[in-house]
Image (cartoon, helix red, strand yellow):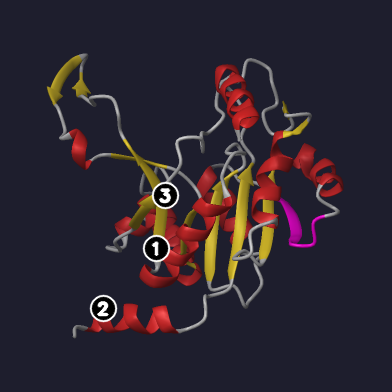
Amino acid sequence: MGISKLSQVIRNILPLKYCGAVIVAAGTASRMQGIDKVMAELGGEPMILRTVRAFENCDVIGQIVIVTREDLVEKIQALCAKYPKVTAVTIGGADRAESVRNGLKLLSPKVRLAAIHDGARPLVTDAVIDRTVRAAHRYGAAAPGVPVKDTVKVVRGGFVKSTPDRSTLQAVQTPQIFDVDLLTGALEKAKKDNAAITDDCSAVELMGMSVKIVAGDERNIKVTTPTDLKIAASLLEEM
């Protein structure tokens, strides 16, 4: 049995590692046409509250840190005062990677897995969080994904250059969950190298680490535009 195989067997036997969540809600919502998506109403309450509650109610999550805009820190602290797993609400950075780093710094020393989640994905389910945590426990890095339905084209200068095999493509969602030391090191290296990263998986991939993809949920959409908010409201009624 190889070392990696042995490591996976050992991880499966050991108790599930303590997982802390960093919920990132520090964006400017530039595509929301004046709607503050963090506080936008969804099902009669602010969207961020639904996102936080999904992690508060999940048994495999032990701690929650929320990263948001400076003007929203006190509001979100008040909203989440009834949730014991929320231990800190802090200010975001100049970009997403810096915001994630700010959140990681406030996780408890006992956290061994860090779950990074978009605050604008309020419909994430307990099942998605649970299976992603368990995959990260086993493999060190995991994220949920759903198969891409549309044909994707690589376009340069307005012309199609290639067509990837759709069967190999997945739309990756959050939470993206990693060994906390691995993620911290990966984000620091990406910053040092001025590397362009599109998500937390990208930083870890640059370190040569493989990320395990587990089944996501098509309802786990990211609210980016007013149309997305309407879709989320419709999906919520069906859940």
Q: Residue at x 63, y 57 (%)?
A: 103
- The quarter of the picture where residue 155 lies is top left
Q: Is residue 140 above or below residue 127?
A: below
The numbered mark at residue 141 is 1
The reply to whether residue 172 is in sight is yes
Residue range (magenta): 83-90
Q: CA distance from mark 2 to mark 1?
A: 14 Å
Is 69 displayed left or right of 234 in the figure?
right
- Residue count near mark 2 (Cα–Cα under 10 Å), binned few <14, some 14–19, many ≥20: few
Nearer-N-terminus badge (2/3): 2
- Residue 206 in the image: state x and y as whole percent: 30, 57
Q: Nearer the viewer, residue 79 or 132?
A: 132
Tag shown at residue 4: 2
Three-letter amino acid code at the position of disc 3? Pro
Q: Quadrant of the N terminus?
A: bottom left
Query: Hey, what amino acid is under mark 1?
Result: Ala
Image location of residue 67, percent across then percent down: 67, 49
Quarter of the view holding residue 11: bottom left
- Which of the 4 image quadrants contains residue 10? bottom left
Q: Dot 3 surroundings within 10 Å: few (below 14), some, or many (20 or more)?
A: many
Of the residues shown, which amino acid type is indicated by label 2?
Ser
Identify which residue is drawn at 58% across, 42% down: 94
Q: Residue 175 placed where, x, y %?
A: 51, 51
Where does label 3 land, which residue?
144
